[in-house]
Image (spheres, grey):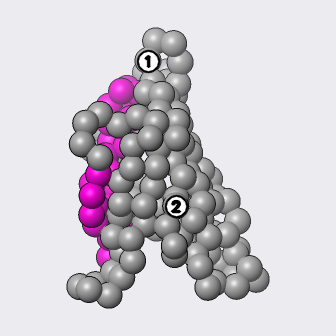
Amino acid sequence: MTAFRLERVVAAPPPEVWRRVTDWRAHAALVPLTSLASADPGPPGPGTVFVVRTGVGRVGFDDPMEIVEWSPPGPSGPGRCELVKRGRVIRGWAVIEVRASGSGSVVVWTEEARVRGVPRRLAAWEARVGRALFGRALDALLRSAG
Protein backbone atom coordinates (compact mmCIF):
# COMPACT_ATOMS: atom_id res chain seq x y z
CA MET A 1 0.00 0.00 0.00
CA THR A 2 1.08 3.52 -0.61
CA ALA A 3 1.26 5.52 2.61
CA PHE A 4 -1.61 7.91 3.25
CA ARG A 5 -1.81 10.96 5.48
CA LEU A 6 -4.81 12.44 7.27
CA GLU A 7 -4.79 15.83 8.95
CA ARG A 8 -7.50 17.33 11.13
CA VAL A 9 -7.77 20.61 13.05
CA VAL A 10 -9.95 20.61 16.18
CA ALA A 11 -10.81 23.12 18.90
CA ALA A 12 -9.91 20.78 21.79
CA PRO A 13 -6.55 20.96 23.61
CA PRO A 14 -3.80 18.44 22.74
CA PRO A 15 -4.17 16.23 25.87
CA GLU A 16 -7.87 15.63 25.14
CA VAL A 17 -7.23 15.00 21.44
CA TRP A 18 -4.39 12.59 22.32
CA ARG A 19 -6.66 10.68 24.71
CA ARG A 20 -9.26 10.28 21.97
CA VAL A 21 -6.97 9.26 19.10
CA THR A 22 -5.09 6.71 21.23
CA ASP A 23 -8.25 5.07 22.59
CA TRP A 24 -7.69 1.77 20.76
CA ARG A 25 -11.01 0.25 21.83
CA ALA A 26 -13.00 3.24 20.53
CA HIS A 27 -10.96 3.33 17.33
CA ALA A 28 -11.47 -0.39 16.62
CA ALA A 29 -15.21 -0.04 17.23
CA LEU A 30 -15.41 2.62 14.50
CA VAL A 31 -13.75 0.56 11.75
CA PRO A 32 -16.22 -1.88 10.17
CA LEU A 33 -15.94 -5.53 11.30
CA THR A 34 -13.23 -4.82 13.90
CA SER A 35 -12.97 -5.00 17.68
CA LEU A 36 -10.20 -4.80 20.25
CA ALA A 37 -9.38 -8.43 21.02
CA SER A 38 -6.70 -7.85 23.66
CA ALA A 39 -4.39 -5.22 25.08
CA ASP A 40 -1.51 -5.25 27.53
CA PRO A 41 -2.67 -4.10 30.97
CA GLY A 42 -1.29 -0.91 32.37
CA PRO A 43 -0.39 2.39 30.80
CA PRO A 44 0.62 2.39 27.13
CA GLY A 45 4.21 2.89 26.11
CA PRO A 46 6.98 1.39 24.02
CA GLY A 47 6.55 -2.38 23.96
CA THR A 48 2.78 -2.28 24.59
CA VAL A 49 0.97 -4.72 22.32
CA PHE A 50 -2.70 -4.76 21.43
CA VAL A 51 -4.61 -6.93 18.99
CA VAL A 52 -7.49 -5.85 16.78
CA ARG A 53 -9.71 -8.64 15.46
CA THR A 54 -11.21 -8.22 11.99
CA GLY A 55 -13.94 -10.56 10.85
CA VAL A 56 -17.39 -11.98 11.43
CA GLY A 57 -17.82 -14.73 14.00
CA ARG A 58 -15.02 -17.27 13.73
CA VAL A 59 -14.00 -16.11 10.25
CA GLY A 60 -11.39 -13.40 10.45
CA PHE A 61 -7.86 -12.56 11.48
CA ASP A 62 -5.92 -10.82 14.23
CA ASP A 63 -3.98 -7.62 13.60
CA PRO A 64 -1.36 -7.35 16.39
CA MET A 65 0.24 -3.94 16.82
CA GLU A 66 3.13 -2.83 18.99
CA ILE A 67 3.74 0.69 20.23
CA VAL A 68 7.38 1.51 19.46
CA GLU A 69 7.24 5.21 20.36
CA TRP A 70 4.96 6.87 22.90
CA SER A 71 5.35 10.52 23.74
CA PRO A 72 2.12 12.29 24.81
CA PRO A 73 1.82 16.01 24.10
CA GLY A 74 2.89 18.30 26.89
CA PRO A 75 4.71 21.50 27.71
CA SER A 76 7.82 20.18 25.98
CA GLY A 77 6.09 19.73 22.64
CA PRO A 78 3.81 17.68 20.43
CA GLY A 79 2.74 14.10 21.02
CA ARG A 80 3.84 11.20 18.84
CA CYS A 81 2.81 7.54 18.83
CA GLU A 82 4.35 5.10 16.38
CA LEU A 83 2.81 1.66 15.89
CA VAL A 84 4.17 -1.34 14.01
CA LYS A 85 1.63 -3.79 12.58
CA ARG A 86 3.03 -7.29 13.03
CA GLY A 87 0.23 -9.52 11.78
CA ARG A 88 0.28 -12.36 9.28
CA VAL A 89 -2.37 -10.63 7.16
CA ILE A 90 -1.60 -6.94 7.70
CA ARG A 91 1.91 -5.53 8.09
CA GLY A 92 3.05 -1.95 8.17
CA TRP A 93 3.15 1.04 10.45
CA ALA A 94 1.21 4.10 11.64
CA VAL A 95 2.32 7.38 13.18
CA ILE A 96 -0.09 9.61 15.11
CA GLU A 97 1.02 13.15 15.93
CA VAL A 98 -0.88 15.73 17.99
CA ARG A 99 0.33 19.31 18.33
CA ALA A 100 -1.07 22.56 19.66
CA SER A 101 -2.42 25.06 17.18
CA GLY A 102 -3.75 28.29 18.64
CA SER A 103 -6.27 27.28 21.29
CA GLY A 104 -6.85 23.89 19.66
CA SER A 105 -4.92 21.02 18.10
CA VAL A 106 -3.79 19.51 14.85
CA VAL A 107 -3.79 15.72 14.41
CA VAL A 108 -1.73 14.07 11.69
CA TRP A 109 -2.23 10.34 11.09
CA THR A 110 0.16 8.71 8.59
CA GLU A 111 -0.13 5.02 7.80
CA GLU A 112 1.18 2.37 5.48
CA ALA A 113 -0.22 -1.15 5.64
CA ARG A 114 0.19 -4.03 3.26
CA VAL A 115 -2.52 -6.65 3.08
CA ARG A 116 -1.16 -10.10 2.34
CA GLY A 117 -2.31 -11.43 -1.01
CA VAL A 118 -3.24 -8.06 -2.49
CA PRO A 119 -1.17 -7.43 -5.64
CA ARG A 120 1.18 -4.42 -5.62
CA ARG A 121 -0.67 -2.97 -8.63
CA LEU A 122 -3.62 -2.35 -6.27
CA ALA A 123 -1.54 -0.31 -3.78
CA ALA A 124 -3.17 3.00 -4.74
CA TRP A 125 -6.63 1.45 -4.32
CA GLU A 126 -5.61 0.10 -0.88
CA ALA A 127 -4.46 3.59 0.13
CA ARG A 128 -7.78 5.13 -0.97
CA VAL A 129 -9.74 2.56 1.04
CA GLY A 130 -7.47 3.06 4.07
CA ARG A 131 -7.78 6.84 3.83
CA ALA A 132 -11.59 6.58 3.69
CA LEU A 133 -11.92 4.07 6.56
CA PHE A 134 -9.42 5.72 8.88
CA GLY A 135 -10.61 9.21 7.94
CA ARG A 136 -14.15 8.35 8.94
CA ALA A 137 -12.95 6.77 12.20
CA LEU A 138 -10.70 9.73 13.01
CA ASP A 139 -13.54 12.18 12.35
CA ALA A 140 -15.81 10.23 14.69
CA LEU A 141 -13.16 10.08 17.44
CA LEU A 142 -12.68 13.83 17.23
CA ARG A 143 -16.31 14.88 16.62
CA SER A 144 -17.23 15.75 20.19
CA ALA A 145 -13.75 17.11 20.89
CA GLY A 146 -14.55 20.31 19.06
Going 76% across and 83% down the picture, which residue do you hit?
A: 121
Q: Is residue 124 above or below residue 13?
A: below
Q: Is residue 130 left or right of residue 20?
A: right
Could you classify mark 2 by the number of other residues whose Cα lies within 10 Å: few (under 14), some (14-19), or many (20 or more)? some
Tell me whether circle 1 and circle 2 mark residues in contact (CB < 8 Å): no
Q: Is residue 69 above or below residue 29?
A: above
Q: Quadrant of the N terminus?
A: bottom right
Q: Is residue 20 left or right of residue 92?
A: left
- Measuring from the top left, give residue 140's x and y in whole percent: 34, 55
Going 42% across and 61% down the picture, which residue do you hit?
A: 64
Q: Quadrant of the C terminus?
A: top left
Q: Is residue 53 magenta?
A: no
Q: Is residue 24 magenta?
A: yes
Q: Is residue 114 left or right of residue 53?
A: right
- Measuring from the top left, give residue 108's x and y in whole percent: 55, 43
Could you classify mark 1 by the number of other residues whose Cα lies within 10 Å: few (under 14), some (14-19), or many (20 or more)? few
Q: Which residue is mark 2?
A: 86
Instruction: Specify the quadrant of the image occupied by residue 104.
Output: top left
Going 33% across and 70% down the picture, which residue do you hit?
A: 53
Dot 1 lies on which element? loop
Say how many tags the image has.
2
Q: Which residue is mark 1?
A: 74
Q: CA distance from mark 1 to mark 2?
A: 29 Å
Res 88 label: none
Q: Which tag is nearer the camera, tag 1 or tag 2?
A: 2
Identity, as a three-letter code, of the amino acid under mark 2? Arg
- Measuring from the top left, give residue 94's x and y in whole percent: 55, 51
Q: Which residues are magenta?
A: 11-39
* Residue 55 makes an appearance in the image: yes
* Residue 9 makes an appearance in the image: no
Looking at the image, tell me whether mark 1 or mark 2 is earlier in sequence order.
Answer: 1
Identity, as a three-letter code, of the amino acid under mark 1? Gly
